[in-house]
Image (cartoon, grey):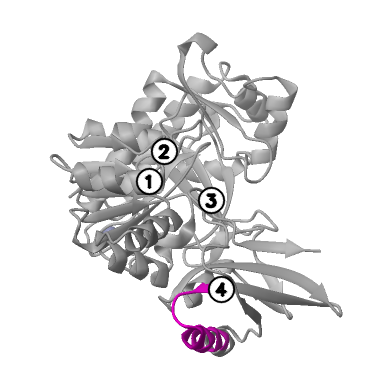
């Protein structure tokens, strides 16, 4: 199912023309109105009429998160990235603040409608539509996360069921009682719910949940984690990508594993070398830079997401021509860890650990010893003492064989490691 087939399946030349037209409209709308971007464009000596083709976008300056944060420090509380008078804004949200002070983001009625539209692409690509009952395993605080997903579900005729204000067992019971068909939550939390169901004798694989949709962390694109979720829930698992300050910019179709489609109808994506800022050709791994086209009230132009991706512009078997992020978001530019001289992404380690379904939860610490970075893994494993020892050894061997990584592994008591509803932080660097 497509939300917008003329654009989703359009030839790339048509798509590029469409993006260019929308970019020009955006710039005309915000220039002289939005103080943040008017200042940036003037400093770069660029006016909207200079934009002669989409290629010209690369002359525009980047936007960074620290720049937006600084702007809010300088002009509290909302900063100057506002195109319209404050009274036009109807929604307040903020980033999760896992990497510093939360960023405050406002939406107008129109830009919220745009968020909802972005979610419609996600739902339809996952096969969710009229008649589905969508459960949100989420606390509904000021983080934007699933608010937009909630309104998006309603707009395509689904029944939206909020799991806010409930503990995990209450959520499971409500999900069963309402015969929910779709679960939306972070991948970590889907696994957490499944293990609580098991502890309480609930066979969640037999529930009416047929589809799960995830975001907030890269887990749902890590093959072993995806499989674990699908087995536990007896459902098909879909990933999507988004950020509070950018929008919901990516979604997975039913061709899996085929990567996450970038919603190029609503966003312009570029991939750059994070060190030099130079554009990289399709297929090269680099930092994703995004311009959103429909959030005129609080736009971002050439926003450096800090996400590492590898784009594939070949047509997808689903019929869409939108580029795909192969393997989803591969990691954060600043997330790469070094262990015994080996550069590695935490997601690669997670993919191996999750191949062992006996491992309930894990955490990792990286510390220096004799001028060498060492990795200490703590595993919570199900089963008898003997089984635990066996799995511990198997994880050790798999990490060694597949990543050339030598680790220290210890066992943790059941239930002793932290569980996460949002933004799991399993890797810690100790100096
Ligand atoms: Zn596809």
> In the image, is residue 13 above or below residue 133?
below
Quarter containing the C terminus:
bottom right
Front of the two marks 2 and 3? 3
Q: Is residue 254 visible?
A: no
Q: CA distance from mark 2 to mark 1?
A: 6 Å
Stretch of the chain drawn in magenta: 379-396
Q: Earlier in the sequence, mark 3 or mark 4?
A: 4
Q: How many marks?
A: 4
Q: Residue at x 62, y 40 (%)?
A: 97
Task: Return the x and y of residue 220 as percentages of the image width and height.
Answer: 40, 60
Residue extending farthest left: 131
Question: In which of the image's four quarters is ligand 1 placed?
Answer: bottom left
The residue at which mark 2 appears reads as 20
The residue at which mark 1 appears reads as 16
Q: CA distance from mark 2 to mark 3?
A: 34 Å
State yes or no: residue 406 in magenta.
no
Q: CA distance from mark 1 to mark 4?
A: 48 Å
> In the image, is residue 77 above or below residue 227?
above
Tag 2 secondary structure: helix
Q: Is residue 367 visible?
A: yes
Magenta residues, dominant SS class: helix
- Ligand 1 within 8 angstroms of badge 2 C-beta: no
Q: 409 or 159: nearer the eye?
A: 409
State if disc 1 and disc 2 touch (CB < 8 Å). yes
Q: Earlier in the sequence, mark 1 or mark 4?
A: 1
- Ligand 1 within 8 angstroms of badge 4 C-beta: no
Q: Earlier in the sequence, mark 4 or mark 2?
A: 2
């Amino acid at each position: 199912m497509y939300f917008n087939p003329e654009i989703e399946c359009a030839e790339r030349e048509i798509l590029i023309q469409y993006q260019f037209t929308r970019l020009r409209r955006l710039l005309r709308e915000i220039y002289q109105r939005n103080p943040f971007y008017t200042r940036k464009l003037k400093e770069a000596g660029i006016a909207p009429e200079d934009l002669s083709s989409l290629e010209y976008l690369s002359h525009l300056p980047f936007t960074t998160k620290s720049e937006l944060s600084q702007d809010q420090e300088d002009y509290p509380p909302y900063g100057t990235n506002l195109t319209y008078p404050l009274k036009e804004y109807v929604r307040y949200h903020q980033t999760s603040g896992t990497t510093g002070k939360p960023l405050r983001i406002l939406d107008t009625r129109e830009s919220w409608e745009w968020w909802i539209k972005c979610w419609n692409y996600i739902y339809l690509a996952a096969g969710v539509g009229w008649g589905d009952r969508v459960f949100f395993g989420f606390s509904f605080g000021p983080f934007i996360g699933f608010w937009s997903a909630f309104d998006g579900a309603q707009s395509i005729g689904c029944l939206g069921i909020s799991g806010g204000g409930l503990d995990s067992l209450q959520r499971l019971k409500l999900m069963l009682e309402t015969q929910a068909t779709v679960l939306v939550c972070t991948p970590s939390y889907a696994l957490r719910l499944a293990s609580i169901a098991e502890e309480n004798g609930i066979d969640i694989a037999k529930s009416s949940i047929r589809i799960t949709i995830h975001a907030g962390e890269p887990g749902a694109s890590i093959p072993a984690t995806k499989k674990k979720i699908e087995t536990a829930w007896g459902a098909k698992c879909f990933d999507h990508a988004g950020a509070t300050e950018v929008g919901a910019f990516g979604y997975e179709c039913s061709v899996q594993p085929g990567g996450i489609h970038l919603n190029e109808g609503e966003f312009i994506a570029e991939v750059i070398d994070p060190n030099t800022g130079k554009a990289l050709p399709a297929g090269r791994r680099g930092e994703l830079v995004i311009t959103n086209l429909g959030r005129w009230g609080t736009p971002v132009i050439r926003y450096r997401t800090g996400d590492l991706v590898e784009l594939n512009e070949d047509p997808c078997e689903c019929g869409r021509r939108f580029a795909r992020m192969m393997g989803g978001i591969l990691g954060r530019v600043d997330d790469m860890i070094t262990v015994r001289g080996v550069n590695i992404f935490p997601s690669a380690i997670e993919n191996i650990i999750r191949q062992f379904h006996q491992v309930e939860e894990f955490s990792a610490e990286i510390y220096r010893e004799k001028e060498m970075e060492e990795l200490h893994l703590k595993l919570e494993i199900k089963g008898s003492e003997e089984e635990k020892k066996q799995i511990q050894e198997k994880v050790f061997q798999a990490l060694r064989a597949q990543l050339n990584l030598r680790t220290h592994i210890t066992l943790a008591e059941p239930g002793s490691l932290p569980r996460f509803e949002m933004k799991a932080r399993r890797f810690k660097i100790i100096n």
